[in-house]
C-alpha cells in the first residue's frame, strides 16, 4: 500500500477488489446508459444485487460522460455507489483527459454532497474503455490531490486496483507526485 497525507486527508493506493471495500462509497466505472456491463461495473452489480439497477432505473436513464450519479450500495459493504462515467479512449486528443478528470471530480462532489468521509475508486476508463494506465493514473491522482487540497474532504480517498500492473503504476505515479508536489 502507498499513501499520502494531504492536510487532514489521505490518499491511499491498494491492490484489491473494490466490491469488498467498506468505505462509505465506492465508485462504479459506469457507462452513459447506466446498464450493467463487464469489468468493475459488472462485478459491482453482481455482488450488490438487483436493487442497484432498480434504484438506478427509478431515478436515471442516462449519465453523460464526465459526470456521476448516486445509488445506495445494495448488498455491498459500502453504503453508496457513485456511478461515474469516464471517457472511451480514442487518441488522447479528443477531450478524453478533461472528461476523465471531470468524472473523478463529479464523484468527489457527490461524496461531499452526501457528507461522506471515505470513498474508493477503481481506475476509471482503463478497462474496456482503453485509457492507457500511466496517463489515467496521472489524471486520477492529480485530480484527487487538487480536490483534497482545495476542499479538505473527503478524509480518505482510496484507489483500489485489481491487477498488479494497475497497482504498480498507480503507486509509481503517487510516489512521483509526492516528490514533485511536496
Image (spheres, rainbow, N blue to C red):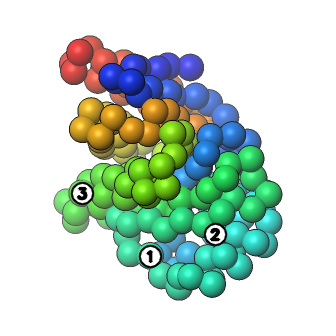
Identified at 41% across, 28% down, the residue is 9
Nearest the eye: 167 or 85: 85
Q: Secondary structure at mark 1?
A: loop
> How far apart, in angstroms, are the residues tagged by discs 2 and 3?
23 Å
Location of residue 154 with respect to 71 vertically, above or below: above
Location of residue 167 with respect to 64 vertically, above or below: above
Identified at 34% across, 52% down, the residue is 105
With 71 as the anchor, is 155 left or right in this view?
left
Q: Nearer the viewer, mark 2 or mark 1?
A: 1
- Label 1 CA crowd tier, 10 Å (few <14, some 14–19, many 20+): some
Residue 47 at x, y percent in the picture: 79, 57
Check contact, mark 2 vs mark 3: CB within 8 A.
no
Q: Which residue is mark 1?
A: 63
Q: Which residue is mark 3?
A: 98
- Label 2 CA crowd tier, 10 Å (few <14, some 14–19, many 20+): some
Quarter assignment of residue 163? top right
Total number of numbered discs in the rendering? 3
- Label 3 CA crowd tier, 10 Å (few <14, some 14–19, many 20+): few
Q: Nearer the viewer, mark 3 or mark 1?
A: 1
Q: For residue 24, which numbered disc appears in the image? A: none
Q: Secondary structure at mark 3?
A: helix
Identified at 39% across, 20% down, the residue is 5
> How far apart, in angstroms, are the residues tagged by discs 3 and 1?
16 Å
Tell which circle, 3 or 1, labels the residue nearer the N-terminal end.
1
Residue that sits furthest to the front in the current view = 115
Q: Which residue is mark 2?
A: 37
Tell which circle, 2 or 3, labels the residue nearer the N-terminal end.
2
Residue 175 at x, y percent in the picture: 36, 18
Quarter assignment of residue 182? top left
Nearest the eye: 26 or 117: 117
Amino acid at each position: 500500500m502507498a499513501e499520502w497525507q494531504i492536510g487532514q486527508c489521505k490518499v491511499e493506493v491498494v491492490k484489491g477488489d473494490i466490491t469488498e471495500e467498506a468505505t462509505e462509497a465506492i465508485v462504479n466505472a459506469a457507462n452513459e446508459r447506466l446498464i450493467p456491463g463487464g469489468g468493475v461495473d459488472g462485478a459491482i452489480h453482481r455482488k450488490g444485487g438487483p436493487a442497484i439497477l432498480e434504484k438506478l432505473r427509478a431515478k436515471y436513464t442516462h449519465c453523460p460522460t464526465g459526470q456521476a450519479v448516486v445509488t445506495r450500495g445494495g448488498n455491498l459493504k459500502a453504503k453508496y455507489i457513485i456511478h461515474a462515467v469516464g471517457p472511451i479512449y480514442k487518441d488522447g486528443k479528443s477531450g478524453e483527459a478533461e472528461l476523465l478528470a471531470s468524472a473523478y471530480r463529479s464523484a468527489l462532489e457527490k461524496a461531499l454532497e452526501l457528507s461522506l468521509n471515505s470513498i474508493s475508486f477503481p481506475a476509471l476508463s482503463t478497462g474496456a474503455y482503453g485509457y492507457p494506465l500511466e496517463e489515467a493514473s496521472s489524471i486520477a491522482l492529480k485530480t484527487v490531490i487538487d480536490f483534497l487540497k482545495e476542499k479538505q474532504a473527503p478524509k480518505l480517498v482510496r484507489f483500489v486496483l485489481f491487477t498488479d500492473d494497475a497497482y504498480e503504476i498507480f503507486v509509481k505515479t503517487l510516489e512521483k507526485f509526492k516528490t514533485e508536489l511536496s
